[in-house]
Amino acid sequence: MQKINSEAPVCDLGFNEKHEAIQPEALKIASKSRRRSSAASTCSFSSACFTGSSDEDDISPREKRQCNSRGYTDFCVKNVTNHHAFGRREIEIAEQEMPGIMTLRRRAADDKPLKNANIVGCTHINAQTAVLIETLIKLGASVRWAACNIYSTQNAVAAALAEVNVPIFAWRGETEEEFWWCLDNCVNADGWQPNMILDDGGDATHLMWKKYPELFKGIKGIVEESITGVHRLYHMSKTGKLSVPAINVNDSVTKMKFDNFYSIRESILDSLKRATDVLFGGKQVVVCGYGDVGKGCAKGLRAQGCIVYVTEIDPICALQASMDGFRVVKLNEVIRNVDIVVTATGNKHVVTREHMDRLKHGCIVCNMGHSNSEIDINSLHTPELTWERVRSQVDHIFWPDGKMMVLLAEGRLVNLSCSTIPSFVVSVTASAQALALIELYNAVPGRYKSDVYLLPKKMDEYVSSLHLPTFDAHLTELTDEQAKYLGLNKAGPFKPNYYRY
Ligand SMILES: NC(=O)c1ccc[n+]([C@@H]2O[C@H](COP(=O)([O-])OP(=O)(O)OC[C@H]3O[C@@H](n4cnc5c(N)ncnc54)[C@H](O)[C@@H]3O)[C@@H](O)[C@H]2O)c1
């Protein structure tokens, strides 16, 4: 059962203050390093990354002596000496587009709400998450950090963190065994005991629970970012294995809206363009599913001049699509004519081999949903079809009559495979993560039980307010009379927990 707590947070970070604009910090380091695109990660925020030269690829970082320019050795990264300057520049670029977390950093830097917090972090390691890590340190925390994904680490960013004495254990292309070794080095350190966990996928929590269960006695709380990790936490809670409170950041309103709609509305275009150079104007597109992700896809593509059809199983979403001006159809009705097929249902086998047999020549097929079985890729591995890899993440599949279909990212999430996640979106999530850590760390005993909670509504509102100055948005304040009339506190929360935004 999800628990919802709408009490005011214990730490006053100026929730009711006027929103101030942030001044971008000047870039300090000019690096001569060249930018390369990162390879696809399975679920990460990937962005520009210098991945290191091939001659060093054969030697595991574990085999190398690790030491930064200050003589600090408590880390393990690919190459601290050669990569750190480039990584620092990437972090500074990300800071420009992460106004919320940077404002939080400034506002709370004096109060140090995370003083004496020892945080084990297990997240993607890229420029945006580095901004979060450095914010937590500025707020008083001591951290030890590992990657939650063996492919998504930006080596240069990890090097930049190591160069400023952050105990970080991560490099791109870790083996499974190295992955657990890195995490173990974070959890189990001499003279340092964690009291908070920031997880993305639940691996830090899992490792501690399996290998160091006694450490949970000192843990004040877990903050979890991903759907998978949240499922694991709810499972632990149901089976009585969760011994500390946890906050599910994944389902906070701000995170959901930004990840599932605003980010998608742009990244569907970005990924299709980068992969195929397609011109959108006048193209016929079918979007399967009209949840938040489908809405983002449909609206983003229509804004470019596409003729967009929608398929749905749910009459409410179908009615929404109709009222938004989209034709709701069965896939069979349009499959012969469309130029692009996008799945966004979270379901399986939404696009079948029969559908693909009927596609027109050159049709682009891709998936935005979590599961890579929305498009029945297995059915395309038959002898009569010929696959040709034409670019990274782009396959041309030929039928015997010469018809060709363009398949992106082999049916995996196309935006995460073929484009990047905007730093602004990560700023929203990072702000929510930092606030959740502050909340759990400072909560008076008894406020939270050993269960999974949503981010308090007031904090969700605060996360949004941190990002408003970017748009020079001016909030209207309730008058006393209006607040009384609506039965609200003038400082929020402004909506009940069941409100659907
Ligand atoms: N690519 C990304 O970056 C990203 C970000 C967030 C979520 N996701 C994933 O995208 C998927 C959709 O997310 P959402 O938040 O929109 O979910 P949602 O549940 O709100 O929407 C999915 C919609 O698909 C409809 N649907 C289900 N089966 C269908 C079928 N056979 N044909 C047509 N419609 C069907 C459902 O009725 C629903 O309205 C999920 O798998 C989610 O994990 C991806």
Image: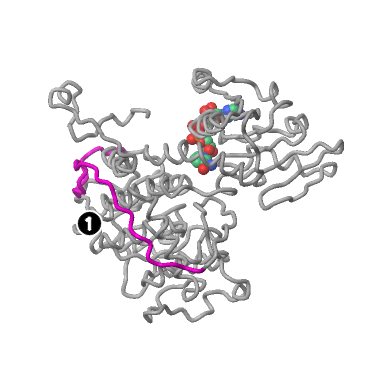
186 or 391: nearer the viewer: 391
Residue occupying the far left of the picture: 480
Residue depicted at x 44% and y 58%: 127
Beta carbon of the mark 1 residue lies under 8 A of ligand 1: no
- Give the crowd class for mark 1: few <14, some 14-19, many >=20 residues within 10 Å: many
Quick check: 141 above or below 450?
below
Image x and y of residue 162, in percent:
41, 71
Quick check: 332 above or below 397?
above
Say whether residue 438 is left or right of residue 391.
Answer: left
Which secondary structure, mark 1? loop
282 or 237: nearer the viewer: 282
| Residue assigned mark 1 | 113
Q: Is residue 152 visible?
A: yes
Which amino acid type is shown beneath numbered disc 1? Pro
Say whether residue 348 is left or right of residue 66.
Answer: right
Q: Quadrant of residue 130?
A: bottom left
370 or 202: nearer the viewer: 370
Quick check: 2 above or below 139?
above
Q: Quadrant of residue 330?
A: top right
445 or 272: nearer the viewer: 272
Residue depicted at x 52% and y 54%: 46
The residue stretch that appears in magenta: 4-32
Image x and y of residue 147, in percent:
47, 61
Image x and y of residue 363, in percent:
71, 35
Quarter of the figure that contains the N terminus: top left
Say whether residue 317 is left or right of residue 418.
Answer: left
Q: Is residue 192 magenta?
A: no
Q: Main secondary structure of the magenta part?
A: loop
